[in-house]
Image (spheres, rainbow, N blue to C red):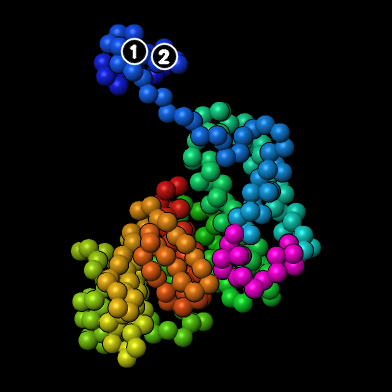
Amino acid sequence: MPICHQCRSVVPDQARFCPFCGVPQHRQEEEPPFVDDKGDVEARLVALFFDSLRREVAATFPGVAWQALTEKLYASGFRDMLHRRMSQLAEQIKAKNEAWTRSTTQKTHLLWLFDELIDYFLIRHATDMIPYGLPEPILKYQQHTLANIDRYAMVMDYMGWPQESESVYTDFLAMPVDHLRNASKYFLFPEKEERIFFICDQSIFGGCTEGFAVTERGLYWKAPLAKAKRYMFHDEANLELSKEWLTINDSFFNAGTTLNYKIFKLLKKMHQLLHL
């Protein structure tokens, strides 16, 4: 039963005033469930997955024909896997209590699952239809917790540096001293003992005065004519990806089209792993 926020007495359900101290009781309106346990739950989940896929394709690959992509999905073995997963999930939702169904946790976990399924479909079945994508090794991190993952190896798999032309450093003893000094001066400000995974130099003359770096805790970067920024993986993030750039909590990030997409996916994955 509810507790009065003033006198801490137990208050009857739906009471507008505390019967002991008379203070008004404020009831927060419950959000409707993202997916409730009524009707055809599996069909609702499938529709939500396609909504997520459509949004990602529209933002990332606007030149890809949606109808052709869905035809590819239904013609591939992914269709059967998708319906199996949604059927299993529908049974789980029906077995949960009403409190879980109405919680934001359900929505968060469903969207994370859709993200993994989208990655799987695009990497395994649609590489011939999209201009760029994610490295296949990232699929081995699906359905894992952070305790089971080598964080450095995962970051490197997401970035796929051998396929990129950028100047990137992972061995800082071999990195030119002035480059390391400039990165530390202009945009890379880690805490003591914070492990640095890589530094990517994107300055015009190769001096590492601009660029970005990923550590075990977050992303640090500096765009031309802008102040240095950072995003810590455990923080909430509003990520918006377009064909030309990425915004992270309203801060501009642009490392190039393919790297923007990889960073977008990496930030979402790291945040997910830290909040499972």
Q: Position of residue 64 (x, y in %)?
A: 67, 71
Q: Is residue 6 left or right of residue 45?
A: left
Relative to 150, say whether 49 is above or below.
above
Residue 225: image x %, image y %? 30, 78
Residue type at the position of mark 1 = Cys
Q: Kindly state the secondary structure of the residue where label 1 is placed.
A: loop
Q: Amino acid at mark 2?
A: Ala
Q: Residues within 10 Å of mark 2 (few under 14, many from 20)?
A: few
Discs 2, 1 touching: Cβ within 8 Å: yes
Q: Is residue 68 magenta?
A: yes
Part of the protein shown in magenta: 55-70
Q: Nearer the viewer, residue 50 or 124?
A: 50
Residue pointed to by mark 2: 15
Q: Residue furthest bottom?
A: 205
Corner quadrant of residue 123 = bottom right
Residue 74 falls inside the magenta stretch: no
When asked about the image quadrant of residue 36, the answer is top right
**55 lies left or right of 235:** right
Mark 1 packing: few (<14 Cα in 10 Å), some, or many (20+)?
Answer: many
